[in-house]
Image: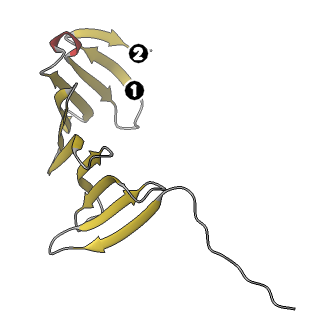
Amino acid sequence: MKVNFRTVSFGNKNIRYHDASHNILETFDDRQNLVRRVKYDKLCRDVDSEEFNEKKEVIGHLHKEYTPDGCIETYKSKTQEYVREIKTVIKDSFTHNIEKFTSQTSPQNNYINEFVRDVTGKLVKIINNGKVLIIR
């Protein structure tokens, strides 16, 4: 008995490779069009991400720059552009996780959130755009 198998694949295909300083993951759709490319640094953190349309044009670009106390994230597409700064600061034995979102396309959505936790990790208060919400 002779049996032949034909390989047919549906769905996305991922290709991983390395350049001089990054690990790169490219995702292709079932028509072999590049959909997304993500670059990772040596610590396996995503540092750059691009999304593509069928014409191989970049439709979204996310870049992250890591700092000793957090991350600065920059995103740009045809409809949206923003910068998000995230950092962790320790003051008087309290941990302050601060997130600042600044949108160039929708400034009405800008915000600054601060989550304050005690030594045990319990959420003590939330500060949203300067308004304090005390957690009990």
Residue type marked 1: Leu
Q: Are marks 2 and 1 in contact (CB under 8 Å)?
A: yes
Q: Quadrant of the C terminus?
A: top left
Vertical placement of 118 versus 34: above or below?
above
Q: Quadrant of residue 40?
A: bottom left
Residue type marked 2: Ile
Q: Is residue 107 left or right of residue 4?
A: left
Q: Quadrant of residue 93?
A: top left
Residue under pointer 1: 123
Q: Residues within 10 Å of mark 1 (few under 14, many from 20)?
A: some
Q: Is residue 125 left or right of residue 49?
A: right
Query: Quick one: 28 or 127, which is closer to the camera?
Result: 28
Identity of the residue drawn at 16% across and 19% down: 105
Q: Position of residue 17 (x, y in %)?
A: 30, 73
Q: Helix, strand or loop at disc 2?
A: loop
Vertical placement of 35 versus 88: above or below?
below
Q: Quadrant of the N terminus?
A: bottom right
Vertical placement of 100 versus 58: above or below?
above
Identity of the residue drawn at 17% across and 45% down: 69
Residue under pointer 2: 135
